[in-house]
Image (spheres, rainbow, N blue to C red):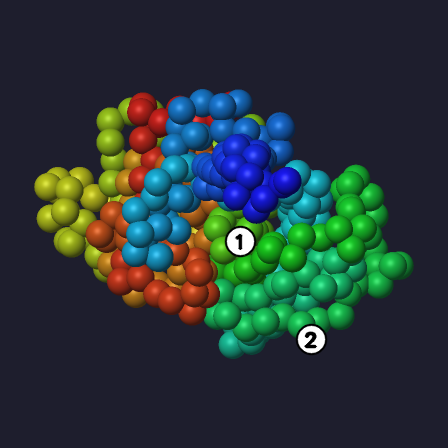
Amino acid sequence: MVTWARCRRRLRWPTLVVFLLFSLLGGYMFANVLYKTPVVNQRLKPEHFDSGTRGIYQKAAESLAIANDTAPTKTTVYEIPEFSLESLLCVLRTGIKQAGEEIRIIKQTIGENEQGDVSVKASLSRIVGVLKRFWPNVAVSDVRGRVLDGIAPIRAKDSGMKDLTSCKVEDAATMNKDIEIILNPIDSIPQLISNSLHHVTTSACILYKSHPAAGIIYQPFLRRSIWGAIGRKERAEEISLRRGAPAYGAAANHVDEAKKRVGSSAVSPVEGGDDYAVLTLLTNPSVVKSEEGLFSEFFSYRKTGVTSLCAGDAIVRSVGGEIVDLRHKPISYAEKTSTVDGYLIKVDALKKKPIN
């Protein structure tokens, strides 16, 4: 006769085995979730690039950790999808060049009192119009934090469309929703009015999950575009870093503070805006062709909106440099309206090899 006690003895070992199997499976699944390495695009894995570029990924992780008051435990790759970056860079560079043409026309035809406002409106209208032509729902704002939803896309018969035929534009439905565009339609309006035209710039920053992915700075009166993208080998041919002795630049009114900081009297004043400051480290911004950047470090002690630094930050990072606040912390773009009390741009070509 089979009793309950006998059944319980017979079921004891099978039950224990099943329990152990489920415990092992649960432990494996938990460890896999906890320690799983982020999957990235095969073409853009960090190990495919030099040490200077790989350091950029760590800085992105550190930037996020500082924003969350936590210490980074491992490198996180904030990577924009390949197709989106390729398309956006092409369309943005074309739109910015077309905006530059309109700025040059305005400079020749409009009175000084109206040149600034008209140039800003024309620049935004052209760049956003080009973007909206291909991606109606793309998130675009200016450096003041204004969302640019009310600008209509350019028409299919617009003369500027022929310049976009070489861009491999993806379908609007495939545009990643984590991508944001920040535009600075005109930097240095006072220099525009005073005819110090090489100081005038137009720029665009591509943010991916609130981290700079790529930037473009265009000088409309020199017809020169400087651009770079983090984690990509392509960059503007004009970028050439300073390779001689260190040289320092500072915003025109902040030379004395910079001299104290670096312990040197050889600090050059720089007019112009934040984008122009970036150019002084990547090239000689006052001439079309240059052998190397003017400075290895630049200081500013003025209160600055972080979005004004976004385009330059992406370009500088793409060549192994950095833009940090005066406490040497990376700039955070999680809050678009936040500011810093000053910043430092640093590119050491002797220690951080640019992407070739």
For the N terminus, give its image quadrant: top right
The residue drawn where x is 65% and y is 57% is 177
Residue 209 tag number: 1
Callout 1 secondary element: loop
Query: Taking 80 as reference, is 118 above or below it?
Result: below
Residue 125 tag number: none
Compared across the picture, whether 241 is left or right of 40 comes to left
Taking depth in this image into account, of 323 and 20 the one nearest to the observer is 20
Residue 91, image x, y percentages:
70, 49
Residue 89, image x, y percentages:
64, 44
The residue beneath circle 2 is 150
Residue 213, image x, y percentages:
53, 45
The residue drawn where x is 78% and y is 59% is 133
Q: Quadrant of residue 140?
A: bottom right
Q: Quadrant of residue 229?
A: top right
Q: Residues within 10 Å of mark 1 (few under 14, many from 20)?
A: some
Taking depth in this image into account, of 223 and 27 the one nearest to the observer is 27
Compared across the picture, whether 286 is left or right of 148 comes to left
Furthest-right residue in this view = 157
Whether residue 187 is visible, yes or no, is: yes
Amino acid type for the residue under numbered disc 2: Gly
Whether residue 343 is visible, yes or no, is: no
The residue drawn where x is 31% and y is 62% is 340
Q: CA distance from mark 1 to mark 2?
A: 24 Å
Query: Taking 256 as reference, is 149 above or below it?
Result: below
Going from N to C along the chain, the mark reached first, 1 or 2, is 2
Q: Quadrant of residue 152?
A: bottom right
**Which of label 1 and label 2 is nearer to you?**
1
